[in-house]
């Protein structure tokens, strides 16, 4: 690789690290120059694909990842990134995602993130046992991944009905990453489903504390409080309606929340 190509590559990577729209667009320019200087520069091809992916340019990202695999068929990262693109594609390309992740794992058997992607692809296809197996392999290579423990917690309960295993997985995720709101939400939902309302309330409250704009946690918290403290539930419904009201995606849920609030207010009026 020429010095000119390498300098452009380093500048592109440095810009991409900043992560903003402008920085990513600057990264595209630098990395494109690196490829112009050396079309065989596989790291630059892959980095350009990653930046296009961050910008939401799915087709351009896929083209760069494929170019990377053609230049170096032993480079696992582009296959994993292709898997990520397929997995999140609007056309639900789960088979293609699985194939890409398997290729990445074949090239790097200890590739934890590829096992996670493989688990997600298998879960999306309804292959529950295959997903669990992939997640467990991911943990062999990276036992400190809170996200994998959370994924296991979700699939254990939602697909297998395994309460104890689900709670243990979610708790492990929270221990590893106390700021992981997804794991706390999952744990709270399992507690709520089992009627363990104080435990559910504690976790939902923590999610709201960590992410005050998390409408899902606020909604669920109001529902649980209806069973334990209707007056607090009223306050939470009002707070949820105020927060979620302007959001088009929450319209149906806001309508339901208003019904709950009206019902509680009517009950209190009758009890006066």
Image: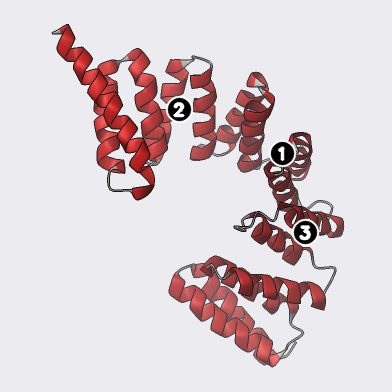
User: SS class of the residue under badge 2?
Assistant: helix
Disc assigned to residue 126: 1
Label 2 crowd (10 A; few <14 / some 14-19 / many >=20): many
Q: Please name whichever residue, 28 or 193, is drawn nearer the observer in this view of the structure.
A: 193
Q: Earlier in the sequence, mark 3 or mark 1?
A: 3
Q: Residue at x 81, y 76 (%)?
A: 70
Q: Of circles 3 and 1, which is in front?
A: 1
The x and y percentages for residue 44 are 68, 78
Q: Please name whichever residue, 215 or 211, is drawn nearer the observer in this view of the structure.
A: 215
Q: Label 2, label 1: how many angstroms apart (C-alpha)?
A: 28 Å
Q: Please name whichever residue, 96 or 180, is drawn nearer the observer in this view of the structure.
A: 96
What residue is disc 2 on? 203
Q: Is residue 236 visible?
A: no
Q: Residue at x 64, y 38 (%)?
A: 151
Q: Residue furthest left?
A: 272
- Left or right, 40 with respect to 47, comes to right
Q: Quadrant of residue 127?
A: top right
User: SS class of the residue under badge 1?
Assistant: loop
Q: Please name whichever residue, 174 or 120, is drawn nearer the observer in this view of the structure.
A: 120
Label 1 crowd (10 A; few <14 / some 14-19 / many >=20): few
What residue is disc 3 on? 100
Q: Label 3, label 1: how many angstroms apart (C-alpha)?
A: 18 Å
User: SS class of the residue under badge 3?
Assistant: helix
Q: Of circles 2 and 1, which is in front?
A: 1
Q: Earlier in the sequence, mark 2 or mark 3?
A: 3
Q: Residue at x 69, y 75 (%)?
A: 63
Q: Earlier in the sequence, mark 2 or mark 1?
A: 1
């Amino acid at each position: 690789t020429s010095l000119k190509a390498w300098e452009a590559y380093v500048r592109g990577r440095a810009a991409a690290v900043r992560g903003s729209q402008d920085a990513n667009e600057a990264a595209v320019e630098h990395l494109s120059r690196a490829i112009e200087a050396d079309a065989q520069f596989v790291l630059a091809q892959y980095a350009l694909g990653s930046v296009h992916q961050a910008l939401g340019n799915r087709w351009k990202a896929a083209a760069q990842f494929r170019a990377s695999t053609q230049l170096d068929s032993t480079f696992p990262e582009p296959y994993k990134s292709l898997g990520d693109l397929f997995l999140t594609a609007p056309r639900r390309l789960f088979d293609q995602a699985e194939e890409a992740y398997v290729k990445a794992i074949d090239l790097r058997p200890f590739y934890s993130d590829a096992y996670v992607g493989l688990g997600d692809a298998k879960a999306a296809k309804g292959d529950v046992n295959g997903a669990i197996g992939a997640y467990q392999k991911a943990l062999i290579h990276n036992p400190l991944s809170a996200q994998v423990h959370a994924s296991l917690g979700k699939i254990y309960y939602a697909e297998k009905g395994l309460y104890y295993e689900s709670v243990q997985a979610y708790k492990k995720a929270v221990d590893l990453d106390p700021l992981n709101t997804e794991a706390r939400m999952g744990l709270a939902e399992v507690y709520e489903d089992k009627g363990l309302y104080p435990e559910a309330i504690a976790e939902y409250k923590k999610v709201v504390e960590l992410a005050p704009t998390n409408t899902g946690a606020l909604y669920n918290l109001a529902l649980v409080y209806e069973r334990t403290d209707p007056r607090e539930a009223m306050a939470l419904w009002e707070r949820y309606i105020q927060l979620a009201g302007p959001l088009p995606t929450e319209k149906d849920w806001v309508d339901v929340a208003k019904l709950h609030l009206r019902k509680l207010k009517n009950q209190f009026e009758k009890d006066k």
